[in-house]
Image (cartoon, rainbow, N blue to C red):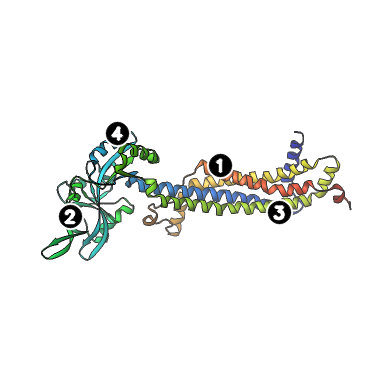
């Protein structure tokens, strides 16, 4: 216990003393700033990636279901399944769908599309279409006609708008006296929606009754889609549904449906973390060099302390303290600067974009038009522990070298 205060005192003395060798001081300062830069870069980049992940997930799940229930075989009593699903407290909304794929034709414009038959009584609990309508009226989508809702990007691709008629070409055939012809249906665009997502360039919504007429399906659906109060409860709710609905239905959560996408984001975050931690490692190597030079510069001081009875362990602790102070100071500076940068990165990027008239984030590519940021406590803890650990490891070799200095050898020519 008596050795620690002495080690701390001398280590602090060495750290704040003006060294005769300016180069050693510069290396120590660069090590501290390198650690600070690495920590700040890690915090900022990981916060931005966390923000992108959250915002994209929210954008996707705002219009995508949290759980999809599909019949494995027909016929099934989907009305009973709907009633059972609604009984679960975690369920916010549920709606049946008929799903078709085909071509959408308007004059010379042809575009592939996904046609979805929806139940207007349930649609708002699954898709927020009412607030996304930019033209027309969703109420004109009646049960007994073939009016449709079209995404804005799809409408622009077809050069069609509200009131125009488009042709749906289904991958089915009709046999008649004139031969085999593809199945066609003329429909009227009743409204155009804009969710600012991938749904806008391929989705067409029509009434559930109308979609059944197109496919000649009587009282059958292709899927039952569910929205939850908390999307993170999807695996637990899916397990309950498996027990509740039995083996007649296949259940898929949003985590399974978009697993490859979110795995890619997670891998990018991991790779970015590994790359940026190299900055801290380079600073740690600089710290090793700095401490080795300090040990060489202080050989005579160490020898005198040893002749006065200081044990090697105390000498070792002096340089561990000195290196740790540099590491702790650099880490704290990096935390402060990184948090400030992460909290204000959205405003900073906006200023840069307005100043240089550039656009770093294209909304049609990333689904959001700004740089988001989300600081997670776990990331801060991991980054801090990693920086402090690397700083401490960097002190081991110079400290052991200092402890092995022999007084007789160091003072031979004095």
Q: Is residue 16 visible?
A: no
Return the disc, 2 or 4, that comes first in the chain's sequence: 4
Q: Which residue is mark 4?
A: 87
> What residue is drawn where x is 27% and y is 57%?
113
Q: Which residue is mark 3?
A: 289
> What residue is drawn where x is 59% and y is 54%?
278
Judge by depth and name the residue closer to the eye, 17 or 339: 339
Closer to the eye: label 2 or 4: 4
Judge by depth and name the residue closer to the eye, 310 or 325: 310
Q: Which mark is on residue 381?
A: 1
Q: Quadrant of residue 3?
A: top right
Residue 340: x and y in percent read: 52, 45
Q: CA distance from mark 4 to mark 1?
A: 41 Å
Is 108 located above or below residue 138 in the figure?
below
Return the disc, 1 or 2, that comes first in the chain's sequence: 2
**Neighbour class for label 3 at 10 Å: few (<14), some, many (≥20)?**
some
Residue 99: x and y in percent read: 25, 51
Q: CA distance from mark 3 to mark 1?
A: 27 Å
Q: Secondary structure at mark 1?
A: helix
Q: Quadrant of residue 335?
A: top right
Residue 279: x and y in percent read: 60, 53
Q: Which residue is mark 2?
A: 188
Quadrant location of the N terminus in the rendered image: top right
Judge by depth and name the residue closer to the eye, 5 or 259: 259
Return the disc, 4 or 1, that comes first in the chain's sequence: 4
Return the disc, 3 or 1, that comes first in the chain's sequence: 3
Q: CA distance from mark 1 to mark 2?
A: 57 Å
């Amino acid at each position: 216990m008596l050795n620690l205060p002495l080690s701390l005192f001398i280590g602090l003395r060495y750290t704040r003393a003006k060294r005769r060798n300016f180069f050693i001081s510069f290396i120590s300062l660069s090590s501290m700033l390198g650690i600070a830069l690495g920590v700040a870069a890690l915090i900022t980049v990981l916060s931005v990636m966390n923000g992108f992940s959250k915002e994209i997930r929210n954008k996707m799940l705002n219009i995508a279901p949290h759980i999809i229930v599909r019949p494995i075989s027909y016929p099934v009593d989907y009305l009973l399944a709907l009633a059972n699903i609604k009984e679960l407290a975690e369920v916010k909304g549920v709606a049946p769908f008929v799903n078709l794929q085909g071509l959408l034709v308007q004059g010379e414009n042809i575009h592939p599309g996904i046609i979805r038959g929806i139940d207007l009584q349930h649609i708002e609990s699954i898709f927020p279409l009412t607030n996304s309508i930019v033209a027309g009226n969703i109420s004109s989508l009646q049960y007994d006609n073939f009016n449709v809702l079209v995404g804005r990007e799809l409408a622009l691709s077809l050069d069609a708008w509200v009131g125009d008629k488009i042709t749906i070409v289904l991958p089915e055939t009709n046999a008649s006296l004139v031969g085999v012809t593809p199945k066609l249906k003329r429909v009227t665009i009743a409204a155009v929606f804009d969710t600012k997502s991938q749904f806008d360039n391929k989705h067409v919504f029509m009434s559930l009754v109308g979609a059944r007429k197109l496919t000649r399906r009587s009282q059958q659906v292709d899927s039952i889609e569910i929205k939850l109060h908390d999307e993170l409860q999807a695996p637990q709710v899916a397990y309950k549904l498996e027990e509740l609905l039995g083996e007649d239905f296949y259940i898929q959560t949003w985590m399974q449906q978009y697993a490859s996408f979110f795995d890619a984001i997670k891998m990018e975050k991991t790779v970015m973390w590994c790359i940026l931690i190299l900055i801290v490692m380079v600073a740690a190597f600089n710290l090793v060099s700095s401490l080795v030079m300090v040990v060489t510069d202080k050989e005579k001081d160490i020898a005198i302390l040893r002749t006065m009875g200081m044990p090697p362990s105390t000498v070792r602790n002096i340089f561990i303290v000195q290196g740790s102070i540099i590491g702790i100071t650099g880490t704290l500076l990096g935390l402060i600067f990184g948090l400030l940068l992460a909290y204000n990165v959205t405003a900073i990027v906006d200023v840069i974009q307005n100043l240089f008239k550039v656009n770093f984030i294209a909304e049609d590519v990333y689904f959001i038009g700004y740089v988001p940021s989300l600081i997670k406590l776990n990331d801060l803890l991991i980054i801090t522990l990693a920086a402090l650990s690397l700083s401490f490891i960097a002190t081991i070799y110079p400290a052991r070298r200092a402890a092995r200095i022999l007084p007789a050898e160091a003072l031979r020519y004095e």
